[in-house]
Amino acid sequence: MLFTTAVFACLFLPLVLAGFFIAARISHSAAATWLFGASLFFYGYWMPEFTLLLIGSIVGNFFVGTRIGRTPRATAKHWLVAGLAANLMLLAYFKYANFFVDNLNAMVGFNWNVGRVLLPVGISFFTFTQIAFLADAYQKGVREYKFIHYGLFVTYFPHLIAGPVLHHSQMMPQFDDAQTYRWNTAQVAGGLAIFAIGLFKKVVLADGISPYADAVFKPAETGLSPDLHEAWLGALAYTFQIYFDFSGYSDMAVGLSWLFNVRLPFNFNSPYRATNISDFWRRWHMSLSTFLRDYLYIALGGNRYGPARRYANLAITMVLGGLWHGANWTFVFWGGLHGLYLVLNHGFRALCGKTLLGRLSRSPIFLVLTWMLTMLSVIVAWVFFRAETFSGAWRMLRGMAGENLTGQVHPLLWNAGMQFSTGARWCFVLGVIAFLAPNSNRIGTRVLDLCRIHTTARAWVGGAALAASLFLVLMNTARDSVSAFIYFNF
């Protein structure tokens, strides 16, 4: 079930919201149970055949987590290892079995066939969430003995499919807080406002520019070579498509949670304003970056064993982060590129030293140059992220490098019934919004504060946001097809 559909906005969400606060009048446990059941229904509506898999994962991890919390540390470590292994094996089978077998067959000439293993939607997110829980249970003494709260923590529908990756400490205190179960008009108005902003980003901006990316990337996969303008338009179109697609989802997840008096961590913070690649990863998919840092980079040794080991750990972390996004060598290469970018960035900073770096960071010219270099690096990497094969990615890059000079007619765009000038205007507008417009996290926070202070603002904000949301949902429903969020594939 997509946030952008009429079924969700006009049926599922009102029923779940009303049921939650009605059940809360009976007991907080009843309300949590209702929301847990609704979240399972939300997942099952999308992929009913994997609902039992999700429930089994929750039950298994809850059992292991309680064993970690109730046994001596030496025994708890064995439970931790067993739990991590089970989660990783589950993820490996469903996400990487076909990838592994196909590559093994290609290398050694075998003809093994395991069939086509379907990828359960959201498996990466609910698996990583539970891995974090087990690690925190062992390292930080986290305890959770209420199964309903744990199940809700994992399945909570605003984050279940595409994040953010949540931590036990971020959610459990909220499920125990009595304020969570009381209707709050200010929270509802603020939540609808940021939900409407995210819906606009997805339905209008991301879906509006996506045809221009498809018109160039898809022919490149079939062997056609884009010209200079087409290649850059396709690369920029996808750069903005994924930005507003994921930013829109992140806003909607936060806004939906505010309706239930739950605060999700912000997961997206204007990453295209970053002036270096480290800053980019502090702003893009912030919860995943934190997870990779805390549970992979630091576990590998972090920066504790000298510069060489530190750079190796950075590279390994990003390669595995790329593989997490998908079972394809282009994702691995994308992660490797970002690993290389991070190594070069940290190496440059170490070479400059704090004094020189402090002087350079105060120079507007230096900041503009580093921002341009960061954006160029990100755009080049996005080409591999979007391309299905290396041959398609190389055709795109060769086109961007000017291998095919631009003529009067841009054949790939012309064949798709599109004009370069229209796509260029789209990219210009989206660039202005991404680089200069106020951050939606800050907008949402200010709107929420306004609604808390001024009673009349709640009605105006809530009414306008509700009307805008319904209009956007109806507009999206009227289309020939409804597009899923890009991160649903991961």
Image (cartoon, helix red, strand yellow):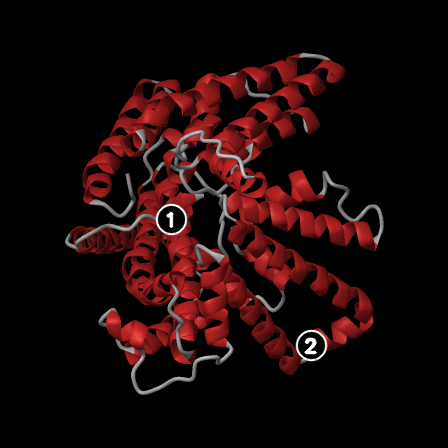
Q: As drawn, is 472 to the left or to the right of 275?
A: left
Q: Is residue 95 above or below residue 480?
A: above
Q: Which mark is residue 168?
A: none
The quadrant in which residue 341 appears is bottom right
Please, what is the three-letter code of the amino acid marked with disc 1?
A: Arg
Residue 389: percent from left, percent from top: 46, 56
Q: Residues within 10 Å of mark 2 (few under 14, many from 20)?
A: few
Q: Residue at x 71, y 20 (%)?
A: 77
Label located before the other in sequence (2 or 1) = 2
Q: As drawn, is 201 to the left or to the right of 265?
A: left
Q: Residue furthest right?
A: 306
Q: Is residue 433 visible?
A: no
The one of 122 and 147 positioned closer to us in this rendering:
122
The quadrant in which residue 11 appears is top left
Q: As drawn, is 40 to the left or to the right of 327?
A: left
In the rendered image, which residue does mark 1 sit on? 452
Secondary element type, mark 1: helix
Q: Residue at x 73, y 48 (%)?
A: 313
